[in-house]
Image (tube, rainbow, N blue to C red):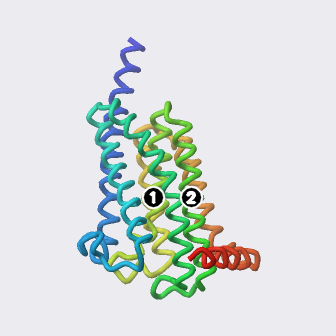
Amino acid sequence: MNTMATLAIKSVRSRQDDIFFSGMSILILAAVFLGFARTYFLAGVFRAHLPNMLIHVHGAVFSAWILLLVAQTLLVSAGRLDLHRRLGMIGAGLAAGMVIVGIFAGTDALARGFIPPGSRLDPKTFYAIPCFEMLTFCSLVTLALRARSDGPAHKRLILIATVGLLAPAIGRWPFHFVNSTIALLGIIDSFVLLLVCFDLCSRRRIHRATVMGGLVLIASQTLMIPIGRTVFWHHFASQVLRLWTSFS
């Protein structure tokens, strides 16, 4: 009886996970589309007016990750774990490529002196943001790959890693309030809060991967700007810029 009850609980929990993580992946897709619809997706993607080919590649690679996330969650929901695992191998390679392309795109923005409209940060301080985002993404995806045999931990770490990439998309939403840093971070962290609420409702406790991933994300958000304003970081950014321009 105890065995049957345990199996029933696992079955219900698995179904709840399928619905929640599929819904979250679609919500993330909608958030990204809303942010980049006018300047990228509805502008013809590769016909969109972007600074250079590197930014086109950046957009394509990061879009592929979001689409892969949706596909992977739907495959798990459909019980196609065989295809999920095969695509997971592609996803690992894609994640590695994203880190490289993300750092290159951030450095290209530094070389162009780019800062978001309305931002009070200088380009060298702003450069800390893509660097910390890529470091956070790389760390969480690495932890997720190590935990791939533990489904609940794996999916939570992948979800939070992806949430950490949403700032550029959310910052481009056609709403004035997202110009506030507090509002922007609040929206991003609300995705993690939804995961916390789901854990409490479905498990009566917060999953350890949610705690770990959430703390890594919040630590990154808290430290990136203060570190970006330091003399050390500005010296580092200057050296990177000098190296980048020497190869341009």
Q: Secondary structure at mark 2?
A: helix
User: In the rendered view, would you say 98 is above or below 92?
Assistant: below
Q: CA distance from mark 2 to mark 1?
A: 9 Å
Q: Earlier in the sequence, mark 2 or mark 1?
A: 1
Taking the image as shown, residue 181 lies to the left or right of residue 10, namely right
Residue 163: which disc? 1
> What residue do we see at 53% from left, 55% from top?
137
Q: Position of residue 59 (x, y in %)?
A: 38, 66
Identify the residue under disc 2: 217
Q: Position of residue 112 (x, y in %)?
A: 52, 83
Q: Position of residue 219 (x, y in %)?
A: 63, 61
> Outermost residue, top direction?
1
Residue 58: which disc? none
> Outermost residue, right direction?
232
> What residue do we see at 74% from left, 78% from top?
235
What is the three-letter code of the residue carrying label 2?
Leu
Q: Split into 4 quadrants, where in the image is the N terminus?
A: top left
What is the three-letter code of the residue carrying label 1?
Val
> What residue do we see at 36% from left, 33% from top?
14
